[in-house]
Image (cartoon, grey):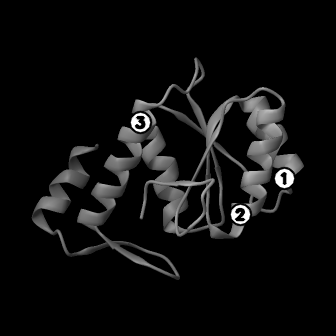
Amino acid sequence: MPSFITELARQRPEEIAVRDSDHTFTWTEVGDILNRTANNVLALDLGPNRRVAVFAENAAETAFAHLGSLFGSASTVPVNFHLNAEEAAYILVDSDSRIVFVGPETLDRGIAAAELARAQGLEISVVGWGIDHAQVTSWHD
């Protein structure tokens, strides 16, 4: 974790660090989310390329997925949230991503894309936020 986030969480734990149209996050919350994401990414076998995909609309959590993954020594692959499942699956397989992060708006397409990618031999997990679904792991909630 970058020291500036740790220091801001220590000095100003309740100060708002990030705000989007739906949520606000304090420095403490941002630090916790990024640490949790980075540690989970580090703990997984992401293959030799260490790539994860982010298939989500614009939100604070989308940025957290990218940053947390980067802090977890992975490269991130942005997947445009306008794509359908087949198009997203192509990107997942082509990039050899081992995790696909999804938000509530891309949940169904993300699961379908992961299933299509698995059918082509890719080992991939779906991780999301704001989602209550048996096929999705949540690191943010």
Among the two numbered marks 2 and 1 on one chain, the one whose residue lies closer to the N terminus: 1
Examine the rendered structure and indicate whether residue 95 appears above or below residue 113: above
Label 3 CA crowd tier, 10 Å (few <14, some 14–19, many 20+): many
Q: Nearer the viewer, mark 2 or mark 3?
A: 2
* Residue ID at (19%, 61%): 9
From the viewer's side, name the closer residue of 91 and 124.
124
**Would you name the residue on which mark 1 appears?**
85
Gap between marks 2 and 3 measured at Cα: 23 Å
The mark lying in front, picked from 1 and 3, is 1
Given the current orientation, which residue lies at the most extreme bottom position? Answer: 21
The residue identified by callout 3 is 72
Q: Quadrant of residue 7?
A: bottom left
Q: Which residue is mark 2?
A: 106
Q: Secondary structure at mark 3?
A: loop
C-beta proximity under 8 Å, tags 1 and 3: no
Q: Is residue 66 left or right of residue 105?
A: left
The CA distance from mark 2 to mark 1 is 9 Å
* Tag 2: amino acid: Thr
Quarter residue 17 falls in: bottom left
Query: Is 39 displayed left or right of 57 in the figure?
Result: left
